[in-house]
Amino acid sequence: MEALLIQSTSQTPYIHFNNADGFMEIKGRSIPDNSDAFWLPVLNWFESYLTNPFKSTIFRIELDYLNIQSSKRILFLLYTLNELIETG
Protein backbone atom coordinates (compact mmCIF):
# COMPACT_ATOMS: atom_id res chain seq x y z
CA MET A 1 0.00 0.00 0.00
CA GLU A 2 1.37 3.39 -1.01
CA ALA A 3 1.19 6.50 1.14
CA LEU A 4 -1.46 9.01 0.10
CA LEU A 5 -0.17 12.46 -0.77
CA ILE A 6 -2.39 15.23 -2.11
CA GLN A 7 -0.93 18.71 -2.50
CA SER A 8 -3.05 21.63 -1.36
CA THR A 9 -4.80 24.10 -3.64
CA SER A 10 -6.73 27.26 -2.85
CA GLN A 11 -9.82 25.06 -2.29
CA THR A 12 -8.45 21.72 -1.12
CA PRO A 13 -6.25 20.73 1.81
CA TYR A 14 -2.84 19.11 1.89
CA ILE A 15 -3.31 15.47 2.80
CA HIS A 16 -0.54 13.07 3.72
CA PHE A 17 -1.50 9.66 5.05
CA ASN A 18 1.46 7.37 5.63
CA ASN A 19 0.77 3.73 6.36
CA ALA A 20 4.48 3.03 7.05
CA ASP A 21 4.53 5.12 10.25
CA GLY A 22 0.80 5.65 10.98
CA PHE A 23 0.98 9.43 10.64
CA MET A 24 -2.05 11.09 9.02
CA GLU A 25 -2.23 14.82 8.34
CA ILE A 26 -4.84 17.14 6.84
CA LYS A 27 -4.17 20.88 6.73
CA GLY A 28 -5.25 23.98 4.87
CA ARG A 29 -8.68 24.87 3.51
CA SER A 30 -11.34 22.41 2.43
CA ILE A 31 -13.96 23.95 0.18
CA PRO A 32 -13.81 21.77 -2.95
CA ASP A 33 -16.35 22.34 -5.70
CA ASN A 34 -17.05 18.61 -5.87
CA SER A 35 -16.61 17.28 -2.37
CA ASP A 36 -17.36 13.67 -3.28
CA ALA A 37 -14.74 13.60 -6.03
CA PHE A 38 -12.10 15.03 -3.71
CA TRP A 39 -12.83 13.01 -0.57
CA LEU A 40 -13.69 9.60 -2.08
CA PRO A 41 -10.02 8.59 -2.71
CA VAL A 42 -9.12 9.75 0.80
CA LEU A 43 -11.91 7.73 2.40
CA ASN A 44 -11.09 4.68 0.27
CA TRP A 45 -7.41 4.88 1.22
CA PHE A 46 -8.28 5.09 4.90
CA GLU A 47 -10.65 2.12 4.67
CA SER A 48 -7.79 0.09 3.13
CA TYR A 49 -5.45 1.26 5.88
CA LEU A 50 -7.81 -0.13 8.51
CA THR A 51 -7.29 -3.66 7.21
CA ASN A 52 -3.61 -3.52 8.27
CA PRO A 53 -2.96 -0.44 10.43
CA PHE A 54 0.39 0.57 11.90
CA LYS A 55 0.79 -0.24 15.61
CA SER A 56 -0.09 3.37 16.47
CA THR A 57 -1.90 5.96 14.39
CA ILE A 58 -1.48 9.70 14.80
CA PHE A 59 -4.14 11.85 13.15
CA ARG A 60 -3.53 15.60 12.90
CA ILE A 61 -6.03 18.07 11.46
CA GLU A 62 -5.19 21.76 10.98
CA LEU A 63 -7.91 23.35 8.88
CA ASP A 64 -8.38 27.09 8.51
CA TYR A 65 -11.81 26.68 6.98
CA LEU A 66 -14.05 23.87 5.76
CA ASN A 67 -17.48 23.66 4.23
CA ILE A 68 -20.37 21.45 5.36
CA GLN A 69 -19.62 18.69 2.85
CA SER A 70 -15.99 18.51 3.96
CA SER A 71 -16.98 18.48 7.61
CA LYS A 72 -19.18 15.44 6.94
CA ARG A 73 -16.28 13.58 5.28
CA ILE A 74 -13.86 14.46 8.06
CA LEU A 75 -16.40 13.44 10.68
CA PHE A 76 -16.71 10.09 8.90
CA LEU A 77 -12.91 9.72 9.06
CA LEU A 78 -12.98 10.46 12.78
CA TYR A 79 -15.76 7.94 13.41
CA THR A 80 -13.76 5.37 11.46
CA LEU A 81 -10.66 6.24 13.47
CA ASN A 82 -12.70 5.74 16.64
CA GLU A 83 -13.61 2.24 15.41
CA LEU A 84 -9.89 1.53 15.00
CA ILE A 85 -9.32 2.61 18.60
CA GLU A 86 -12.14 0.41 19.85
CA THR A 87 -10.73 -2.65 18.08
CA GLY A 88 -7.33 -2.07 19.69
Image (spheres, rainbow, N blue to C red):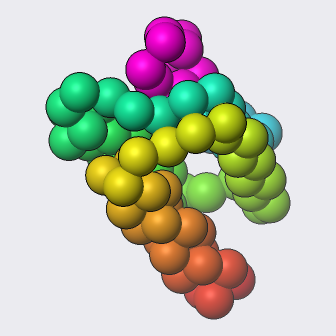
Given residues 48 and 79, the one toward you in this image is 79
Which SS does the magenta portion mostly show? loop
Q: Position of residue 68 (x, y in %)?
A: 36, 55
Q: Is residue 13 left or right of residue 69?
A: right
Q: Using the rendered view, name the quadrant where residue 85 is placed.
A: bottom right
Residue shown at 45%/23% (left/top)? 12
Q: Is residue 25 above or below residue 78?
A: above
Judged left or right of residue 82, residue 34 is: left
Residue 88 belongs to the span the image colors magenta: no
Image check: 67 left or right of 2? left
Please name the residue shown 48% across and 66% down the image.
75
Q: Nearer the viewer, residue 59 or 63?
A: 63
Q: Is residue 22 left or right of residue 83?
A: right
Q: Is residue 72 above or below residue 24?
A: below
Residue name at image x 39 percent, y 33 percent: 31
Horizontal and vertical percent for residue 36? 20, 41
* Position of residue 78 measured from the top left corner of the image (x, y, whole percent): 55, 67
Can see residue 55?
Answer: yes
| Quadrant of image for the C terminus | bottom right
Please report the bounds of the magenta region as a residue range: 2-15
In terms of depth relative to the viewer, which is nearer, 42 or 55? 42
Tally of numbered discs: 0
Is residue 3 in view from this perspective? no
> Residue 70 placed where, x, y %?
39, 48
The residue located at (33%, 40%) in the rendering is: 39
